[in-house]
Structures are given as C-alpha cells and as structure tokens.
Image (spheres, helix red, strand yellow):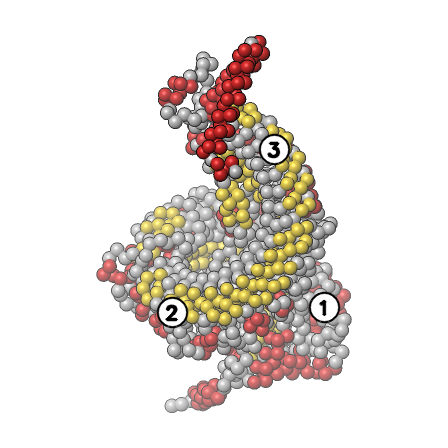
Amino acid sequence: MDTPTTWIASSLFFWVIIQSSFSEGCFKEENDVLLNIKASFSDKEPYAYPDLSYLQTWEPYISWVEGTDCCEWEGVQCNAITGRVAALTLVDQNYLYQPTYLNFSDFLVFQDLKELHIDGIDCCVEHAVDENGICLLGRSQYARTERRKLSNLEVLELNLTSSNACKIEHCFSAISSLKSLRLSVDTSVTLTAKSFKDSWKMVSSKLRNLEHLRLHLPYLPSDIILPSLKKLTSLRTLDLANNGLDNTFNFSDLASKFMNLEVLDLGFNHFNESEEIFSSLSVLSSLKSLTLRGCDLTSISYSSLSLLHSLEFLDLLSPLGYDVNTSFPAISPQGTKVSSSLKTLYFNPKNVDANMLRSLKDFPSLTMLEISGSNFDRNVTAADFVELRKLEHLVLDNCFNLQNDFFKSIGALTSLRILSVNSQINGSLPEADWSNLKELQELDISYSEFEGSLPSSFVNMTSLQKLDFSGGNRFSGNPASNLASLTSLEYLDFTGNQFQIPSSFSFFANHSYLKVIHGNGDNIIPEPHPASQTWVPKFQLQELILPATTRKSIVPFPNFLLSQHELTVGDISGWKLVGEFPNWLLVNNTKLIDLSLGNNFFTGHVQFPSHVTPNIQRIDVSENDISGQIHGNNISSIFPKLYILNMSGNAISGSLPSEFGPMKSLVCLDLSDNDLSGEILANIQPKSSLIRLLKLSNNKFTGEVTPLLALNHLAYLCLDRNLFSGEIPSALFSNTSLLSYVDLSNNNFVGKLPRLAFNSSALNEVSLSNNHLEGNIPTEFGGELSALDLSGNNFSGPVPSFENSVLSVIFLGDNRLSSLPGRMFSENGNDAVILDLSNNEISGTIEDIISNTDVLNILILKGNKLTGNIPEELCKFSNVLSLVDFSHNSLSGPIPKCLGKITFDTPDPDFMLNWPNVMDQVRYPPSIVLRRVNFTTKSRTYNYQGMIFAYMTGLDLSHNKLGGNIPPELGNMTLIRAINLSYNDLTGHIPSTFSNLKQIESLDLSFNKLSGNIPPQLTKLTSLEVFSVAYNNLSGSTPDRNNGQLITFDGSSYEGNPYLCGPPLRNPCADHNGQGQSPLAYAEGDNDNNGFMDMYVFCISMGVSWTTVLLVMVAVFYINPYWRRIWFYFIELVIDTCYYFVIDHFPRLYQ
C-alpha cells in the first residue's frame, strides 16, 4: 500500500522529469550575458598554444560560440531542472596585458547562480572605471540594492591581481547567502592594512552564514587578519595558509573566537614551535583537521596532541624535512595516551628507522600515512608497518636509502588499498607475496629506477585497479603473464620502460574493466603467436596513448581496436603502421576528443565520418602517405569543437579545402609539406574564424596573401617555401594585435617594405628571407621583436640601427647593403645573440659593429668590404662567443692575442633547439632562430641549423690581409672545432700550443708566409678531419705518420712548401747520417719523379752552366781578334740566309 511519503516522492520525481524535458538548455538572456563577458576579456595573449592541454588552459572560452547551448560550455554548469546557470567559472589569463573589469549588475540575470569563481579579473565592478582607472563601484546606490538579488549565491571565489582593484568588499558584502568565500589578493597595491580592516568591519557583520573561509593576503600584517574576522562565529573551515604569519600570531585568540572550527589550515607560514600551537588549540573540541605543512617546524612535540580528542587529520610535512626532529612517545608527560582518533598523518622526520615506525602503533585508527623526503634506515622493510592493522593508504615518496628488500615482506600489509613508493630504489623488484594484497586497488612505483623483469610472484592482485610503472623505471621483458592475472585492472601506465608488449594485447583477454593504457609505442613488438592477433576484448578503452619516437620496424595494426567504440583519446603515432587510413576509428568512436595517428605509413584518403563527432578537439594525421584531396562535407557540423587539425607531411593535393571555412572553433591548422596548390581565396571565412596558427609551408600555393588580412586572431603565420608573389601588404603586420610569428621566406614576393612593417607591438619573430624584396630596410621595430631574417633579398642602403629595439637574432646576409649606421646598438647595450651581415657591400670597421652590445654568440661578417684591425673589444665576449666569420674582407694588422681568452663553447642547446613540428605536444611553433647559418669548415660551406649548430664552434679569418705572427694564445681555445687563417700574410712559426685544441676538426693555415717546422705535437690532435699548411715557407720534415690523425692527410695538405720533406710528399728527407738519397737513385725508384727538389737543382745547374759558357766566350773574343771577326761574320751570314729564305718562300708576307 502506498504511503504519503511514497506518493510525494513519486510526484516530485515526475515533476523533475517533466521540467527537464521542457528545458532546452541555457536561457537566451544568460547566453547573451556570457558572450558579452567573453568579449570583455583582453585579447593580447600572443601565443597559439597548439598543445591541446595548453589550449584548454589558455583558451577557456573557445567553446563559447554563439548559437550553441551555454550549458555545454567550459566553465558553465546549469541547473538540471530549470536549465539556468548554477555555477560559473571566469578566468582571464591575459590580465598581465590588460586587466578586465566586469559590471556586477550583469550577474543579476543568473537567478539560480550558486557558485561563482573569478580568477584574474579585477573585481566585480558596477559601471567599470573612470577615465583615470579608478573604480566607480559603490558610488551608485542602485548597485548596492541590486547586489541583494543574488540571493542563491553560496560559493564565491575571487582571485584578484590588478593594482586598480576596487574595494573588494563590494563584491560580496551584501550577499548574505554566502556559505563559502575564497579571497586571494596577490598585489600589495590592491589591499592595504587600513582598507582591509575598515572593509571587514562591515563584511563580517553581514556574512553571518559563512561557514568556509579561505584568505590569501600575504601583504597584510599578521596582526590585522584575525581581529577582522571576529564576527564570523559560524565558521567551520578556516584557511589562512601562505599569509606570512609568524610566532606573534595569537593562537589562543583564534581558538576562543571560533569554537566550532572543524578544519584549520595554517600551512606555509612562519611558525617554528609546535607546543604553543597544540596547547592553544586544545580547546577546539570539534577540530578534526589541522594542517601545518611547510611551517619550518624545528621540533614537533606530541605532549599536547592528546587534548585534540577529535583530530582525525594532521599534516606536518615540512619543506625542510631533514631539520625536523620528530618523536612518538607512547605516553605523554601527562600520562595520557596520544590521540586514538587520528586517521591521516603526513610527516617527514629527518631519519626513519624501524623503532620509529613501530611506535606509530600508538595511532590505532591510522588508515592513511605519508612519509616523504626522509632518510630511511637501510634495514627498514614493509614488515615494520605491520602494527598499523588498519593502514589502507601508504605513501613513501622522495625518500632516501629505501632498498628493494623493502618489498620482500610487502605481503604482510594485507589491509593496504593504495601504495605509492616514488623513491630512487634501484635494482630489481624482488619476489614477494604480492598475491596476498587482495585489497590493493592502486599501486604506484613510478620514478623508482627499477630494472629487469617483473618477478613471477607479481600476480593475482585481484582488486588492483590502477598500476603505474612510469617515470624513471627501466623494466624489461614481456610482462604479459603478470598483467594477464590482474583482471580488475582499469588503469595501466608503463611509460618510459623497456617492456616488450605483444602488439595484439591478447593477454588482456580476461579483463573486463580496462579503460586506460599509457606507455611507449617503441615497446610494442610483433605478436609471437600470430593466431592471437585477432580476438574480441571484453573491455572498452577510454584512453590508449602509446606514441613511438624511435621505432624503425613495422608492427601489425592492433586489430582489437576494431571493437572499441568508447575511445576518448587515441595516440598510436610513430608505430610505422601500414595499410589504408583507418577511417573507421573516427566512425566508431563518437566520444573521441584527441586522435593522433601521425608518423605512420597509412595510404589512401582521409574520409571524415558522416555523423556528428561532437567532442573531438584534435586530429593529427601528419607524416603519412595520405594522398588525394580532403574529402568530407559539412566538416564544421561534424566536428563542431575541433580546435587543432594537423595533416602535414602527406601527399594531399588540390586547393585549400573550402570545408574549413565554417569551422568556428578551429584554432590551429597545419597543412604544410603537402602538394596543395592554387590561390588562397575566401576558403577561410574571416569574420567567424578563430584561427591563431596557420601553417601552409612547403606547398605550391600561388597568388597574393591579401585574403589572409581579415584573420584578426592570427598569431602564427607560416607560408614559407611556396610560390606566393606580389607585394607584402603592410596591413599584414598591423591588422591584428596578436600576430607574433611570420615566416614568408622562400617565395617570390617583390617590392619594398613599408616603414612601419615591423612596428607591431606583438611581433616576435619575422622571416622574409629568399624573396625579391628591395629598397631600404625599415628602421622602426616593435618592442617585442627579437628575431629578424631578411637575408637573400635585394635590400640596399645602410644597415638599420637597432638601438631602439630588443632584437637579439639578426640575419641580413646576401643583400646589397653598403654602409653602417651611426650607432648600431644602444648605449645601454643590446643582447644581439646572433648577427649575420655576410655577403653584402658593407664598408667600415668591425668596431663600428660590435660597440654597445653586451652579448654576442655568433658574428658573421664575411664577404664585405670591412677594413682596419680586428679590435680587442671583440674579446669582451670571451664567455659567450661561439662562432666568428670575418673572411673575405680587407682586414689588416695582427691577430689580437686576447682572442685566446674566448672559450668558443657551444651555445645553449635550449636556445639552439630546432623546434619540432608545430602540432607536436609543444607550446611553440618552430622558431626562425638559427634556422640556418652558413659557415665554411672542412673546405666546404655548410648550413648549420637547430641542434646540429649547438655543437659547432669556429673562427674564420681567411681571405684578408692579416699579418704578423699567429699568437700562441690561440692554443687556449680548447673547445673550438674549426680555425681558418688561410689566404693572409701571416709570418713566423706555427704555435706548438695548437696541440691543446683537443676538439679541433678543421685547421687551415694555407697560403700564408709561415716558416719553420711543423710542430710534432700536432700529432696529438685526434679529431682532425681537415688539415692544410700548403703554400707557405715551411721547412723540415712532415709530422710523424705512425700515429695520430695526421696519417690520413695526403700531399695536398703540405704542397707549396719547397723546403718541406717527408711523406706524403715525394721528396725525401736526409737520413740519419745526413746523406740524402741521390736524385738518380730516387728517379730509378720512381720513373715519374717530378719533385720540387730535383727541378730546383736542375735549374740551378743549367743557370750556372750557361753563365760559365757566356763568360768564356766573352773572354776569348776579347783576347783573340781573329776569333772575334769569325764570330761576327758567322752571325751576319746567319742573318742574311734567314732574310733571303723568307723572301723566297714567303713573298706575300714580305709584301
């Protein structure tokens, strides 16, 4: 028989059903207000955040699209019955650029609002601010009245940051329904001691129902906060963590004012005595939770802990755990046992041994224990916790000296439900009674540096739901038999290990609850039993994240995915999978959020599903062999929340698909490295487009880029390596305040650049290299522009001055620039990390260039008309300079000795990073910084880029007019890899200190006037690949060829030195008796003898012989007149005979 209660409950249930059926989502007036709030946020964040996790954090309103149900928007929750907004989270991550002010009256439309969280917004402001930025809140009596209409608001969180914030009490003082308030003010300008004290006199009297209060006011004096809260007598939770409180804080006063407190958090303040804290709080009979984490407690006494009879939670973790002296007396000085109600304990004493752990039995109710950052005795084992018979949750993270023997007795802790040991243990996981842990639900042994195979006893933990091996472990072998026995498993993470996982995953055949698998795709191996490749799982995965980065071999496609239809995240990129593109993954899994199939060998076409996939936010099919055109109608309807689409690195043809036009949520589009062509027309609708990153690099697009001007949210534009032409419109750089990165290099752009082309405040990196641009380079640069590449064009005129810029990377090489500015850099100094002015027509001196700059890593000035000496001022960069190229100029004078002080260390690898593909899990797109730097070494010119360049250092002074000796101090450049001093007028000896150049790979001293011997110490240079001392005046023997790298060089490295002998030259040196081998004997040994020494002797002999003959003839003719007359008669006869011979035989020549 139905009771009245049953009848009422049934009626209420049907009423809820009816109301829900008539609710059609968010009310229009609420929807409109939310869109207005979105529009009010500053939009100056310059990054595109291609990583999905960053995108969700930094673009919290990307789902707030007109025409969609606001109840489905990020940060909005609606009442299930009325459909009105019940909870609202507003975050403005752009407050650093421009604070956002909201009209508090806008919130009055949310009649059912119960929770409001505001972060980074400058208070709830009625009528915003006046012309001076001063808040006008409180001047309108209407505002005070209207605030009372938020009668349902119970939870309010305000994180204020701006120095122009209004009086904060106006945001909540009249909301008497508030039960929970969280207030954080991070700037001292916003809140002063006086303003807070005055404000809270009114606040505390009106918030009578407030039960939970969290204050983060680190700039207020500690003696101000507590007295201001005295009227909040209903408080049950008080959080004063991280407020800079110290020992002057009155704990007794706090305890007397808030007798109903159940939760008290005083963490991260400056208390160091626990005795006073415990004794003062002993009167709080209802206190269940006490947090003193991070309070620098130097000692912890539990003598007063027994007075906190209701205490269930105690957190004493200290960031300086090694300074904490902790003891657990079984009986307090008063003779009373310590608290028996304590269930949760966090602490980190300096040392932990078996006796300390056994003393924990005095907390018989303890269910959760965390000991982190402590130094364990090496003999501690799991058995030392056995007295804690109710222990369910044990955490031993970041501890020292824990041994793998700890786990041998782990089977004794049969009550455990959660075990986390993230400490550097090393060794293998030992055999133990793991199967005794029947209650264990979560096991986390990540970052413990285990290695080897899993023990055979690691089986049959039948309740285990979460297993985490990730981090710094190096487990190996095939864990299939272990994992097969864990039939309750829901979450598995083996990332970073060296397991060999069969690709079929058939060992999960008996699992029904598996939802998440994280790991390395490099660990996947072909199925050893091909018959197991096809099977039907009982589970439905939600996440499968197994990216591979180093795989070279091909594995079969995991066919068990054919039966999966609950996937939200799928990543099997880099597996080198072959076959047709698996379009069925998109068709079968309508709940997908993130799908990554990049870096495989999929072929065919991508066919998007015909049905709606409402949640998918990211699709990455890059680096495959997909061909044809992109097929799919109404993509905007099929993927209404798609933020990131990466189809780069394929063979997709056709024009830019028009299907991308209506996609209102698309933020990042990467179609680079394909075979797309045609012009960019109206395929991307500018009015509705939110595109922040557009990458069309390395295609065959033609025409102008004018249609892109309307993309007013664009932050990154990559159109390099195409066939675009025409002039670059000036509005491209100024149309949007977000544009940060522009790469138009390697196209056919012509014309001149406007004067203000680079003056945008958001521009950070610009590359226009290898086009046909001309005229002067613009001279005004934006305040954020740090990298500029204009190389490979036809720019003329002077090099612009950078004294009013923050440029640190400058590429202006391969132009027709002719002169230097009056001042290159500012007097305060620029950090010009890279300066490349190579292959221009610049005249002047090096000193004109490097003055006023404090940091210089790379200086490329080759191929100009620079004159003068190499200034010693260059040596001020001794700790940062890594690459110098002054070749092909007209420099003169000696080489400065101080160059030997330059370390020529490799640049910072983080700075030289060659950013990965734009849609990889990174925040930034590829940087133009160090895209390519030309440097001649090893007799060839190389393009160094990215991380490769991070390992290149060198000095090139070749093709100048430098004179004097080579300074021996250059031998101190022990980290340099290339030195080229060829084609100069250097004299003197080769310094023996060059033997200290242990990293040298290329040493070229050819075409100078060096003399003396080649130092035998050079045989110590084991890294040499190129060595030349050719065409000097060196003498003596070549270095010993029995050891060292010099044995690899042929005669071309030594030729042109007439007094140099020994192999690999063909002229020998004198033997040990001082007798050289005869030329005849040498000729007999080598019929092709054409050595320089033999030719020289021959010429000398011939000269002496002819001179002797001539002198003898002169003497004879002078002494004997008869012979003189005969000689002249003979000469006359020869002349007449020749004359008549020519007349007779060559009459025409005579005529």
Residue 448 is at least partly visible in this image: yes
- Residue at left offset 50%, top offset 86%: 23
SS of the residue under disc 3: strand
Q: Compare marks 3 and 2 and give the one earlier in the sequence.
A: 2
**Which quarter of the picture shows residue 389?**
bottom left
Instruction: Look at the numbered discs 3 and 2 and tell me whether their residues touch, using CB distance below 8 Å.
Output: no
Q: Where does label 3 land, which residue?
A: 985
Q: Where does label 1 land, which residue?
A: 164
For this view, does 1 lie left or right of residue 859? left
Q: Residue furthest left?
A: 531
Q: Residues within 10 Å of mark 1 (few under 14, many from 20)?
A: many
Q: Compare marks 1 and 3 and give the one earlier in the sequence.
A: 1
Q: Nearer the viewer, residue 352 or 1102?
A: 1102
Q: Nearer the viewer, mark 1 or mark 3?
A: 3
What amino acid is labelled 1 in the image? Asn
Alpha carbons under labels 3 and 2: distance apart: 62 Å
Q: Where does label 2 land, which residue?
A: 628
What amino acid is labelled 3 in the image? Asp
Q: Nearer the viewer, residue 775 or 424?
A: 775
For this view, does 173 lie left or right of residue 445? right
What amino acid is labelled 2 in the image? Gly
Instruction: Look at the numbered discs 1 and 3 and tell me whether their residues touch, using CB distance below 8 Å.
Output: no
